[in-house]
Image (cartoon, rainbow, N blue to C red):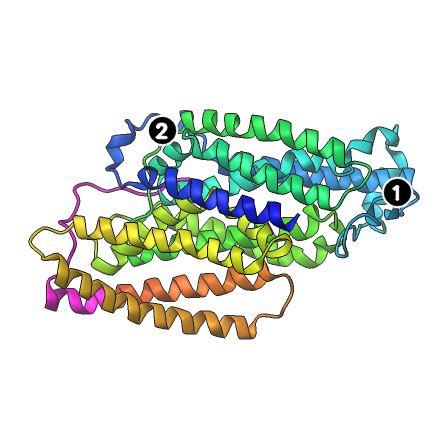
């Protein structure tokens, strides 16, 4: 198992490094085609909401099945899986009433693992592509219609299937077949979805733009973790405890997206422009190995998974440096690179201090619950520090990277 997961981590990273860089190349908004009527645009966020709703509907029906067919005892399946699963809401009066009146409850047997096996892949890929579209709608369309997405679907499915086999149970063979069908259908659906998207929105390369994007990313990450903790682990009984957190994250996300559509593109600055480019490259490079790296920590070699997570980030930084040095006119590359490096070093130190403080203050649960706020703190403080240094020093050193672009672009979705 460990050898196979490690091999998948290495293959996924190598394939991403080979295929992803050209997709992230910056393009003007008009390069991806004219913007049509909003009625023809469908972003990944509404389908993500639908898939999430279906996941919770499955949890409700699974609870009904356990109450009626197994007398409220999930041990028939729980004994095959590790601790932390199947904390059911079997005492909830609404669910008990629904179970009491539900006809033919034995027909709900597929709610045991198999429905989730189909929905898990679209849930993950829709969440990722939603984030990419917030950053750049054109990048999202190119990515969704490129070979990278079917390869990501295959990589994620391989990871899921390896974990399924390691946790074998009476439903494993069914789950493997269902996941294979989902792996074929999901990238086809996402490609058709992207083909209907004609928006030209993108996150401005500015401190307000990047901070709004990071707030959106963090809020969505919280919601994904809540879904994972309460629904994907079949633990609907935790939902009441997690609901205030989910409602707060949803409110923050809605506010951030409303702010995002009102942001105009400012004159780009040196370090902030670099961070914008680095985010584009990192999201594109990390799509394919993301799930392999995540499960490599648990089922593979953690050190290898950590290195595999660092490699796309390092490559993204290298590509962003290349693109930044191409942009300015009238500046020599050597002094510009030294100026950029000095600003990024100061910002990285400030961001690392913020992330360390968050790690020290965050209660230890599963590692994603610590990683998410730490990464958010690092990126937010880094962006703010870069913006402050650009604002203070650009007027003195004359290191703006390009002229003010014409027009106005605002992110949508």
Left/right placement of residue 178 relative to residue 91 reads left
Do callouts 1 and 2 mark residues in contact (Cβ within 8 Å)? no
The quarter of the rendered structure image containing the C terminus is top left
Q: Position of residue 25 (x, y in %)?
A: 28, 40
* Residue 15 position within the rendered picture, expressed as x and y whole percent measured from the top left: 43, 40
- Secondary structure under tag 1 reads helix
Tell me: 220 left or right of 81. left
Number of marks drawn: 2
Which residue: 46% across, 46% down?
A: 13
Q: Residue 263, position in %: x, y?
A: 31, 49
Residue at which label 2 appears = 198
Question: Looking at the rendering, which quadrant does residue 343 occupy?
Answer: bottom left
Q: Is residue 133 magenta?
A: no
Q: Looking at the image, which is closer to me, 202 or 234?
A: 234
Which residue in the rendered view is the most extreme toward the right?
Answer: 71
- Mark 2 surroundings: few (<14), some (14-19) or many (≥20) residues within 10 A: many
Is 412 inside the magenta-drawn segment? yes
Position of 22 relative to 309 (above/below): above
Q: Spatial distance from mark 1 to mark 2, Cα to Cα?
A: 47 Å
Residue linked to disc 1 = 67
Identify the mark nearer the N-term, 1 or 2.
1
Q: Can residue 180 be seen at all in this image of the molecule?
A: yes
* Image point (83%, 44%), residue name: 77
- Image quadrant in which you'd find residue 105: top right
Q: Does 123 appear above or below 40?
A: below
Q: Quadrant of residue 133?
A: top left
Magenta span covers which residues?
389-413
- Please say whether residue 250 is visible from this viewpoint: no
Nearer to us in this view, 8 or 358: 8
Q: Residue furthest left?
A: 330
């Amino acid at each position: 198992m460990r050898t196979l997961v490690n091999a998948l981590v290495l293959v996924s990273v190598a394939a991403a490094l080979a295929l992803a860089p050209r997709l992230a190349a910056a393009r003007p908004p008009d390069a991806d085609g004219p913007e049509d009527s909003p009625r023809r645009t469908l972003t990944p966020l509404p389908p993500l909401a639908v898939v999430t709703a279906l996941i919770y509907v499955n949890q409700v029906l699974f609870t009904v099945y356990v109450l009626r067919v197994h007398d409220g005892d999930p041990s028939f399946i729980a004994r095959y899986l590790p601790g932390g699963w199947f904390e059911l809401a079997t005492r909830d009066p609404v669910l008990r009433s629904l179970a009491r009146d539900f006809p033919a409850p034995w027909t709900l047997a597929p709610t045991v693992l198999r429905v989730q096996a189909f929905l898990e892949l679209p849930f993950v890929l829709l969440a990722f592509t939603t984030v990419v579209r917030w950053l750049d709608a054109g990048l999202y369309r190119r990515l969704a219609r490129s070979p990278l997405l079917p390869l990501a679907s295959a990589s994620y499915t391989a990871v899921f299937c390896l974990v399924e086999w390691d946790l074998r149970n009476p439903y494993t063979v069914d789950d493997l077949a269902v996941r294979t069908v989902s792996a074929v259908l999901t990238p086809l659906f996402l490609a058709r979805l992207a083909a209907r998207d004609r928006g030209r929105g993108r996150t401005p390369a500015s401190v307000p733009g990047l901070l709004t994007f990071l707030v959106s990313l963090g809020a969505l990450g919280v919601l994904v973790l809540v879904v994972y903790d309460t629904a994907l682990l079949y633990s609907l009984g935790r939902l009441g405890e997690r609901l205030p957190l989910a409602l707060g994250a949803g409110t923050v996300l809605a506010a951030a997206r409303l702010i995002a559509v009102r942001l105009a593109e400012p004159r780009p600055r040196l370090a902030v422009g670099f961070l914008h480019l680095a985010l584009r490259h990192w999201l594109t490079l990390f799509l394919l190995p993301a799930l392999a790296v995540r499960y490599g920590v648990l089922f593979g070699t953690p050190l290898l998974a950590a290195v595999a997570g660092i490699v796309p980030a390092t490559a993204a930084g290298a590509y962003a440096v290349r693109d930044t040095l191409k942009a300015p006119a009238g500046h020599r590359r050597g002094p510009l690179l030294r100026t950029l490096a000095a600003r990024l070093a100061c910002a990285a130190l400030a961001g690392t201090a913020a992330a360390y403080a968050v790690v020290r203050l965050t209660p230890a649960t599963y590692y994603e619950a610590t990683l998410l706020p730490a990464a958010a703190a690092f990126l937010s403080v880094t962006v703010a520090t870069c913006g402050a240094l650009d604002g203070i020093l650009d007027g003195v050193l004359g290191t703006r990277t390009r002229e003010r672009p014409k027009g106005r672009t605002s992110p949508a979705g």
